[in-house]
Amino acid sequence: MAFKLKNKEIKKIVGQLKNSATMHAKQAEKLESMSPMKKISGPCKAAAKRKFKVWPSAYASGWGVRCTRNPSSYLGKSKKK
C-alpha cells in the first residue's frame, strides 16, 4: 500500500466489510425466497418447440414461461365429460 493505516482504522474497515457481507447475504436470501427460478414445464416446452422454428430463442423461451404460469390459456382447455 502506498499509505499507512493505523490499527484502529484497519479494524473499522474490516468491521464495515463484515457488516456489508452479512447485509448482502440477507438480501440474496430474500431475493431467492421471493422469486424462485422454475423450469419450463414439459408440455409448454413441447408446444413452444412446435410453435417456433428456433429453440432455444428468446421468443420461444418467453412463450414457454408464460405458458408455464398460465397453461390453460396457452395449451387449450381440457374438455370435461
Image (cartoon, rainbow, N blue to C red):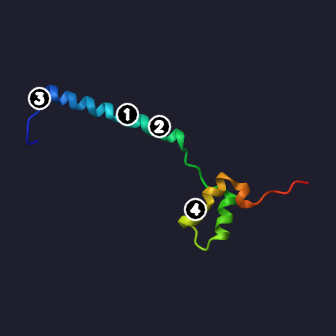
The answer to whether 74 is drawn above or below residue 26 in the figure is below
Q: CA distance from mark 3 to mark 1?
A: 26 Å
Q: Which residue, given by chain and number where applicable, does mark 2 sit on? A: 29
Q: Is residue 2 left or right of residue 60?
A: left
Q: CA distance from mark 1 to mark 2?
A: 10 Å
Q: Is residue 49 left or right of residue 12?
A: right
Q: CA distance from mark 2 to mark 3?
A: 35 Å
Q: CA distance from mark 4 to mark 2?
A: 26 Å
Question: Camera-side residue: 26 or 79?
Answer: 79
Percent position of residue 11, x then y: 20, 27
Could you tell which of marks 1 and 2 lies nearer the N-terminus? Answer: 1
Could you tell which of marks 2 and 3 lies nearer the N-terminus? Answer: 3
Could you tell which of marks 4 and 3 lies nearer the N-terminus? Answer: 3
Check if mark 1's residue and mark 4's residue have beta carbons within 8 Å: no
Q: Is residue 15 left or right of residue 57?
A: left
Could you tell which of marks 1 and 4 lies nearer the N-terminus? Answer: 1
Q: Residues within 10 Å of mark 4 (few under 14, many from 20)?
A: some
Mark number displayed over residue 6: 3
Mark number displayed over residue 61: 4
Could you tell which of marks 4 and 2 lies nearer the N-terminus? Answer: 2
Q: Which residue, given by chain and number where applicable, does mark 1 sit on? A: 23
Q: Nearer the viewer, mark 3 or mark 1?
A: 1
Q: Residues within 10 Å of mark 1 (few under 14, many from 20)?
A: few
Q: Secondary structure at mark 2?
A: helix
Q: Which amino acid, by three-letter code, is at mark 1?
A: Met
Q: CA distance from mark 4 to mark 3?
A: 55 Å
The residue most toward the front is 73
